[in-house]
Image (cartoon, rainbow, N blue to C red):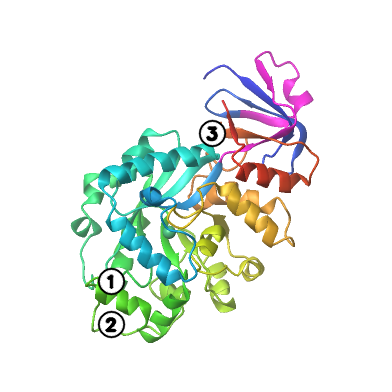
Amino acid sequence: MGEMTAHVGRWVLPVNGPPIEDGAVLHDGDRIAAVGPAPEILRGFAGKVRDHGSGAILPGLVNCHTHLEFSALAGKIPPQEHWQEWLQKTLDASAGVTPQVRERGIQQGIAALRNSGAALVGDISNTGESLPHLAASPLAYQLFFECLGFNLVELGPLEETFPFFSASRADANPCISAAAHAPYSVSPALFKAVKRWNRPRKRPQCVHLAESGAEGEFLAQGDGFFKELLQQRGRWVPEFRPPGLSPAAYLHSLSFLGENTLAVHGVWLDNVDCALLSRTRTWVVLCPRANVYTAAGAAPVPELMRAGVPLALGTDSLAGNHDLNLFGEMLWLYQNYPQYPEGLWLRLGTLRGARALQRENDFGSLEPGKKAALGFIPLSGEKDFWEELYTRGAAGEWQWLN
Ligand SMILES: [Zn+2]
């Protein structure tokens, strides 16, 4: 245990409870020891006191969805008008990225996440290249190794098809999960193999769900953009019969939904899908700015909220977003959905995300026993509190408190 430090601020946002005016957080450099009103916390305290003044002390953010491997494409794909064009451009551009450039991108992406306040990230990887960089960084992570294979109609254990799992000793690292890319790129057998790998190890799993309208069309009719894409990439299966189900119902038919599953995007969901996701306690990870950037659309937030679907936040990648700053997503949601409690978006970007990634014991709120992963955002107090917090956070004013 290190020396105790008390951080004092005009506001403390524990997230698991209401904001504390003139609050303090006590930690020993590793774990939080106490949180509460400053006079109470500082009574009889003999350690170091750092008063940060006008602003808010809050827990490090939890970004549930990034693709650090695409960071090298930052600024290369402008915002699009058609999602299909965004995907095609991203696939084309990423094919031209060398491993060295990709690696530098991963490092820059990790630095950007850190600088904007991320304490924990759920990162999707197709190559495993982000793993050593994440493991060496102060950022906590859950690495989702993403499996693709629409044509893998039969397969044995995941390790046989994807050597990453043995090579990285994924079995022994609880921060590694198997992930399925999407309903249009993963065969039913592969969905089952991914689930069979995660389940006994109690690891969270993730999948892109209902990101584009073309996905629903493909599962309903078996044709359209994704059939052409699969043919183009040599993955088409002529025997494929469309299930005639919505993307959410299709995953449910494969027993892939549930409290261990993060369904990312959830743009093209109807009320029946929302009820199903709520009933199965499936997490929906909203990536609102990315969905605008890539022209995917906008997730039906009011319907999701009404149905009681568990929600978390992600930025998605630098091929399809302006930056990896999760405050940007919070600000966007704050501006677009003024009908909800203003602090809700911070909760989604912290405590809910930590719960989705099954790391609630360490992250997501300022509570005794959790990791001392906290930061400070200066506030003038002249504007609406939450608007100023989200705006300054999105502008990169986060400062880590050690
Ligand atoms: Zn994604």
Q: Do tag 1 and tag 2 residues touch (Cβ < 8 Å)?
A: yes
The numbered mark at residue 371 is: 3
Please give the residue where the numbered disc 1 appears in the rendered image: 150
Residue position for label 2:
240
Between disc 1 and disc 3, the foreground one is: 1
Residue at 74% x, 62% y is 339
Task: Give the residue at x 41% y 40%.
Answer: 108
Q: Quadrant of the C terminus?
A: top right
How much space separates mark 2 and mark 3, taking CA atoms? Answer: 48 Å
Which range is magenta? 33-60
Three-letter code, disc 2: Phe
Mark 3 vs ligand 1: CB under 8 Å?
no
Label 1 to label 2: alpha-carbon separation: 10 Å
Left or right, 35 with respect to 350, comes to right
Q: Secondary structure at mark 1?
A: loop
> From what the image shows, is residue 228 above or below residue 263?
below
Give the amino acid at mark 3.
Answer: Lys
